[in-house]
């Protein structure tokens, strides 16, 4: 099993219940929508997951392209948004084959931690080609090297308290210790970056970048970076 196959199947480790899943994706969609500068924008959401509220982003844009590597998740996305002419669903290879300067805004949220440094650099190069010269690339949910797991747990508990699934969140934290997640983490690892490391990596990939004031999503111990092609 790798990370893609892990996230390709529904289980109670990723989201403690349906309430958690829906609030999680709605929060992300609302945050991304805040970065859509105009209704004529073409937006790419790379590694979008289930994206149950992605239509909120589409309403603010000209077109939203969802990119997902996990085949079952991608099939569910295709079925969910089949009737929305402002949305399309692609594989990573299909997205990479798009014409240069196709998108005003590219977002990759909560994906970088599952990539090696070389894989992240390759994707930053792909995004640099796909984004318009005046456009922006957003890399969200970057995990710092220190105390990532405790802060993730605390953030989940706070998110659960605020959104009505606190006790389910406690149960979810217990289940994760018994799940394949930690076995995968030990086998494949997770990538962590300091703010300085991410800014340097983005600079080397041809961007002028800064850290956003707040992270996309509920975990404010993690970081979001706003990058524009130089």
Image (cartoon, rainbow, N blue to C red):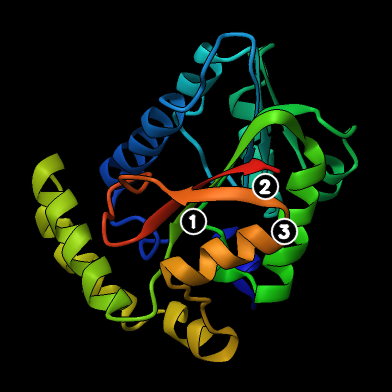
Q: Position of residue 81 (x, y in %)?
A: 61, 23
Q: Does 48 appear above or below 146?
A: above
Q: Earlier in the sequence, mark 3 or mark 1?
A: 1
Q: Nearer the viewer, mark 3 or mark 2?
A: 3
210 relative position to 148: left or right: right
Q: Looking at the picture, tell me which residue is in the foreground, 91 or 207.
A: 207
Q: Does 179 appear above or below 12?
A: below
The residue under label 3 is 205
Q: Earlier in the sequence, mark 3 or mark 2?
A: 2
Numbered tag placed on residue 202 in the rendering: none
Q: Position of residue 31 (x, y in %)?
A: 38, 33
The residue under label 1 is 110
Is residue 6 visible in this depiction of the protein?
Answer: no
Q: Position of residue 178 (x, y in %)?
A: 34, 83
The residue under label 2 is 68
Q: Nearer the viewer, mark 1 or mark 2?
A: 1
């Amino acid at each position: 099993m790798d990370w893609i196959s892990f996230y390709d199947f529904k289980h109670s480790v990723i989201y403690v219940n349906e309430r958690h899943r829906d609030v999680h994706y709605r929060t992300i969609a609302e945050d991304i929508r805040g970065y859509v500068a105009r209704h004529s924008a073409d937006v790419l959401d790379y590694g979008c997951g289930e994206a149950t509220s992605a239509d909120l982003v589409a309403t603010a844009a000209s077109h939203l392209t969802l990119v997902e590597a996990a085949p079952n998740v991608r099939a569910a996305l295709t079925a969910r948004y089949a009737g929305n002419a402002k949305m399309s669903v692609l594989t990573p290879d299909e997205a990479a084959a798009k014409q240069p300067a196709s998108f005003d805004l590219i977002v990759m949220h909560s994906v970088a931690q599952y990539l090696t440094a070389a894989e992240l650099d390759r994707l930053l190069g792909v995004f640099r080609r796909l984004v318009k010269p005046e456009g922006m690339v957003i890399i969200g949910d970057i995990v710092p090297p220190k105390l990532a797991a405790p802060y993730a747990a605390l953030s989940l508990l706070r998110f659960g308290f605020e959104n009505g699934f606190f006790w389910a969140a406690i149960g979810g934290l217990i289940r994760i210790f018994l799940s394949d997640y930690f076995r995968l983490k030990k086998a494949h690892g997770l990538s962590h970056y300091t703010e300085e490391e991410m800014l340097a990596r983005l600079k080397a990939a041809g961007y002028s970048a800064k850290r956003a004031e707040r992270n996309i999503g509920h975990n404010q111990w993690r970081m979001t970076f706003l990058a524009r092609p130089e």
